[in-house]
Image: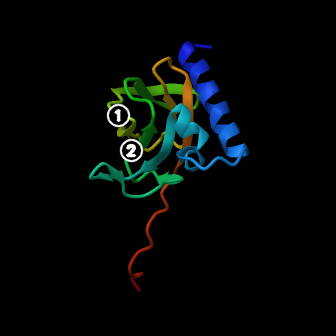
Amino acid sequence: MSVRGRISSVAGALLLSTTLLGGASYAEDMSTHEAMGGVARGMFTTAIVDREPQDDLASLANDQLSVFFFSEMTNMAGQRVTHRWEYNGQVMAEVSFAVGGDRWRAHSSKNLQPIWLGEWTVRVLDGDMNVVSTHNFNYTAATSPMPASIPK
């Protein structure tokens, strides 16, 4: 375990003991992952506006040819974080960026081929290439629209 990992473990233990002892502090309002650093929010979306996702997708029809992955990191300032896009166990893309603050939002996108149906995964990796969080969505076959009227 790295020095940073040991420090994070100790911080998490202190946070837990403070909560268990009933101490009234800021720590009571902070989740363990926030104290140690991680992904507070991660989601697939069809659009990013003003650095915020516009929807939260569990699936996407293949008449849509691109998708975004949004992540909000906490307490990871100074690290290089990577969005690793995977399909059928194969890495399809990696997008890395520097985290510039204790609360940092970032997104990446993937252009999709209509034949790439099935489950897609984005793994968020920290600066040591450890998986911080994992998110999935299903790319499904679009249903054909019904005609407005049937000719007689």
Res 68 label:
2
Type of residue at label 2?
Phe
Residue 136 percent coordinates (x, y): 56, 43
Is 51 drawn above or below residue 111 in the view shown?
below
Residue located 56% across and 47% down the image: 25
Foreground: 89 or 103?
103
Secondary element under disc 1, as helix, strand or loop, is: loop
Extreme residue toward the left, this view: 50
Quarter of the rendering containing residue 73? top left
Q: Earlier in the sequence, mark 1 or mark 2?
A: 2
Q: Position of residue 15 (x, y in %)?
A: 63, 37
Q: Tell me which amino acid carries mark 1.
A: Gly
Q: Which mark lies nearer to you, 1 or 2?
A: 1
Name which residue lies at 41% across and 51% down: 45
Q: Is 94 left or right of 132, judged from the image as shown? A: left
Secondary structure of the residue carrying numbered label 2 = strand
Residue 101: mark: 1
Say which of 32 and 42 sits in front: 32
Cα separation between marks 1 and 2: 22 Å
Tell me the number on the disc at residue 113. none
Q: Residue 109 placed where, x, y %?
A: 36, 39
Q: Is residue 23 above or below residue 134?
A: below
Q: Is residue 28 left or right of residue 64?
A: right
Total tally of numbered discs in the picture:
2
Quarter placement of the C terminus? bottom left
Characterize the local packing of mark 2: few (<14), some (14-19) or many (20 or more) Cα atoms within 10 angstroms.
Answer: some
Residue 104, position in %: x, y? 37, 38
